[in-house]
Image (tube, rainbow, N blue to C red):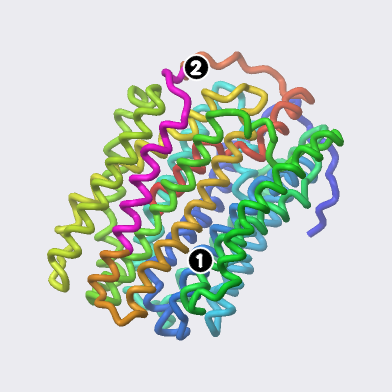
């Protein structure tokens, strides 16, 4: 598929088929969300069928998230420059192919490579969805469409384990875990056809250039931390693993220096250096990495329940449902509580730690006689805490960051969320599988992993104090400006934030991981 710049679209009217087009793009984004979490319940099957090591299982999960995080901002800018629909279609086509390759994996190495490619493909799709929403919908409809966009992320995160559990229990055509990836192929092809029929292309009139070197340095910095965390345990922690981890802050410093050079040259940086002087985005980054690293608990619980206690994949998935219920408990109160910002994030992190401590107590006290109902209280409280913190994090960053930096701040924190998830899988997985490899009991290993999660949530709570204090001010939903014709000015406004446009919604995508 060619990615040459298309002619500017006719923006004198909104797409009359915009709602149908929106449903099509949402269905593709939904596939990404499902694939982020669906693999969790399949880990024991993958280990058995592909003879995968615990390290390879970690890479199969973390590699997808890392590729998504690394490509998200750049993909948004590619959409601005070459056409959002074209980049979306390219990402969707690649997602279909990589899903098929994942399902066809004959060994663990092929599985990991295909999962990384899947994550990169998803990164091309997801930033375009909300960007197209802002161009195709009149102002008075954007709030409703954005609400559906956020709901799609919440439902997708919950649906992943359930869909995986149902498919694995059904053992379709005797293919075991493979259909959880094959199912993306017909859905993706249908969505791709729908985009050609229903969607219109758009792009920014003066799109920012892609900061490829900045992206490379930032990716190397994260890999310098992630690679030794995942691989070091199996290699006995040789000296070079410590050197790589020590190199991470040095590379981040070089990244900051390089981004300042990009600005001095008059180009668009990957991350605006001005953010480093703002309290809100730096606080949001700290909370995002620590708090969302706690999502590594899913790795511990799903493997422990199936491999350690003999639960079926569906039974395991259903055991996780109270977490989603806890997330939903916050929703009715969110509009009234969210404006308090920082205190909600502090309390939410503490609640998540308390809930996970309850799960830890249940696992250790019940041992091999653990029943699902014993995890219900802890899952409910954890879900409530996760919903509170994730629900206010992006809102606080946006409300407390100067308008000219708000889009970049949202992109920074959203990327930090994905990095946090990947780092959490590496850290929690290292503790959990390390205990198992040392001939420890499954219960003791699960306890060690969950204790690590409790510590991460506890660290996130004081980190939230870095966020600026004060109530958050939001415009009323009914105060949208009257509709007007879209034009070049709209494209310019969109180009500044479309690559970051996922703002609060991408934060919610990980609340159910």
Does 406 sit above or below residue 448?
above
Magenta-drawn segment: 449-473
Asked if 330 appears above or below 74 in the picture, the reply is: above
Residue 131, compared with residue 367, is above or below; it is above
Foreground: 267 or 24?
267
Q: Which residue is mark 1?
A: 229
Left/right of residue 1 with respect to residue 379 in the rendered view: right
In the depicted view, which residue is nearer to us: 436 or 114?
Answer: 436
Residue 279 painted magenta = no
Q: Quadrant of the C terminus?
A: bottom left
Quadrant for the N terminus in the image: bottom right
Query: Residue furthest toward the front?
Result: 239
Report, in whole angstroms, how far the alpha carbon at label 2 lies from the one at label 1: 43 Å
Query: Horizontally, is 441 left or right of 228 in the view?
Result: left
**Magenta segment, prevailing SS (helix, strand or loop):** helix
Q: Position of residue 107 (x, y in %)?
A: 54, 84
Residue 456 falls inside the magenta stretch: yes
Where does the image place residue 161, in percent across and percent down from the top left? Answer: 37, 61
SS for dot 2: loop
Residue 202 in which image quadrant: top right
Q: Specify which label sits upstream in the sequence, 2 or 1.
A: 1
Return the residue at label 2.
475
């Amino acid at each position: 598929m060619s990615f040459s710049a298309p002619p500017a679209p006719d923006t004198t009217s909104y797409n009359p088929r915009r709602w149908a087009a929106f449903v099509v793009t949402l269905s593709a984004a939904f596939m990404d969300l499902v694939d982020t979490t669906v693999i969790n319940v399949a880990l024991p099957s993958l280990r058995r069928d592909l003879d995968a090591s615990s390290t390879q299982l970690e890479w199969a999960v973390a590699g997808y998230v890392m590729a998504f995080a690394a490509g998200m901002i750049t993909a948004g800018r590619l959409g601005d420059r070459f056409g959002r629909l074209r980049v979306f279609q390219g990402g969707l086509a690649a997602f279909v192919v990589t899903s098929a390759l994942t399902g066809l994996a004959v060994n663990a190495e092929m599985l990991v490579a295909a999962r990384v490619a899947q994550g990169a493909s998803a990164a091309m799709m997801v930033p375009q969805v909300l960007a197209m929403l802002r161009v195709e919908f009149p102002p008075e409809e954007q709030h409703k469409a954005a609400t559906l966009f956020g709901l799609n992320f919440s439902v997708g995160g919950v649906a992943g384990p359930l869909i995986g559990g149902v498919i694995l229990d059904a053992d379709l055509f005797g293919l075991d875990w493979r259909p959880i990836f094959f199912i993306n192929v017909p859905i993706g092809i249908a969505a791709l056809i729908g985009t050609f029929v229903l969607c219109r292309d758009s792009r920014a009139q003066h799109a920012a250039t892609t900061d490829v070197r900045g992206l490379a340095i930032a990716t190397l910095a994260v890999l310098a931390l992630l690679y030794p965390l995942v691989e070091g345990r199996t290699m006995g922690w040789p000296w070079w693993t410590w050197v790589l981890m020590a190199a991470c802050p040095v590379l981040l410093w070089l990244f900051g220096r390089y981004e300042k050079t990009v600005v001095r040259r008059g180009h668009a940086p990957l991350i605006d250096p001005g953010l480093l002087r703002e309290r809100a985005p730096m606080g949001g980054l700290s909370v995002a990495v620590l708090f969302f690293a706690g999502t590594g608990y899913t790795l511990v619980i799903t493997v422990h329940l199936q491999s350690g206690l003999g639960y079926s994949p569906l039974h395991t998935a259903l055991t996780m449902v109270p977490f989603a219920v806890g997330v939903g408990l916050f929703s009715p109160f969110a509009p009234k509580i969210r404006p308090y910002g920082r205190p909600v994030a502090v309390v939410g992190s503490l609640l998540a730690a308390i809930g996970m401590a309850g799960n830890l107590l249940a696992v250790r006290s019940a041992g091999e006689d653990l029943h699902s109902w014993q995890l219900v209280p802890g899952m409910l409280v954890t879900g409530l805490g996760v919903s509170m913190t994730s629900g206010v994090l992006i809102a606080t960053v946006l409300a407390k960051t100067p308008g000219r930096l708000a889009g970049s701040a949202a992109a920074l924190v959203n990327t930090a969320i994905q990095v946090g998830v990947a780092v959490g899988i590496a850290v929690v997985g290292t503790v959990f599988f390390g205990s198992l490899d040392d001939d420890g009991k499954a219960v003791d290993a699960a306890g060690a992993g969950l204790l690590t999660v409790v510590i991460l949530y506890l660290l996130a709570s004081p980190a939230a104090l870095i966020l600026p204090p004060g109530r958050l001010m939001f415009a009323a939903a009914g105060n949208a400006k009257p509709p007007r014709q879209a034009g070049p000015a709209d494209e310019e406004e969109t180009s500044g934030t479309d690559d970051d446009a996922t703002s609060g919604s991408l934060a919610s995508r990980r609340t159910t991981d």
